[in-house]
Amino acid sequence: MIRILVADDYLPFRQVLKDFLETANPRLKVVLQASNGRDALNLLEKNPVDVALIDIRMPIMDGLELCRRIRKVLGQDIGIITYTGLNSPRLAAQALQTGADLHFVKPFELYALKGAVLKLGESRKASPVAAAVSAG
């Protein structure tokens, strides 16, 4: 199973992502949801996930700061996909510089997102750190 966090301040969009991903592939499971970056980080410090889907524009702590903190606190163990409705090359570059593995601009193709989540999730599960934690 690939465990997923969805951090987005818009509940209906979180629900769309959860319903789509879990229906599209039974190996995908949204195990955590947060409406802001601070809550997402608190959840991640206590609950392991393989992939985080992060909206850039959220209250309290935005997605860019969340990416920075995930990389600082949790390293590379989590695959990070950011997204936003703003088609800004500068914002996309910032997301990648702060630690995102991939960045999507809404509206994006849900099947493309599913493929990216599967690929990132599998790469994190295959990492030596993840294997050592699983074996321990």
Image (spheres, rainbow, N blue to C red):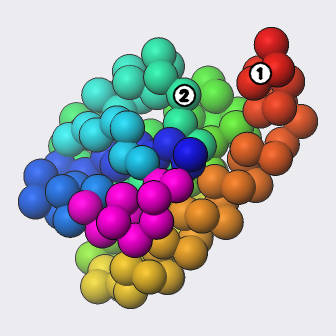
On the image, numbered disc 2 is attached to which residue? 48
The amino acid type found where label 1 is placed reads Val
The amino acid type found where label 2 is placed reads Pro
The reply to whether dot 2 and dot 1 touch (C-beta < 8 Å) is yes
- Horizontal placement of 73 versus 86: left or right? right
- Residue 36 against residue 64 in the figure, above or below: above
- Horizontal placement of 27 versus 122: left or right? left
**For residue 133, which numbered disc appears in the image?**
1
- Horizontal placement of 81 versus 10: left or right? right
**For residue 91, which numbered disc appears in the image?**
none
Residue at 38% across, 24% down: 43
Category of crowding for the residue at label 1, using alpha-carbon neighbours closer than 10 angstroms: few (below 14), some (14–19), many (at least 20): few
Residue 52 place in picture, x, y as percent = 48, 48
Residue 19: quadrant of the picture:
bottom left
Residue at 54% across, 28% down: 48
Residue 40 in view (yes/no): yes
Q: Is residue 24 magenta?
A: yes
- Horizontal placement of 94 versus 86: left or right? right
Q: CA distance from mark 2 to mark 1?
A: 11 Å
Q: At numbered mark 2, what does the secondary structure look like: helix, strand or loop?
A: loop
Category of crowding for the residue at label 2, using alpha-carbon neighbours closer than 10 angstroms: few (below 14), some (14–19), many (at least 20): some
Residue 129 place in picture, x, y as percent = 83, 30
Q: Which residues are magenta?
A: 19-28
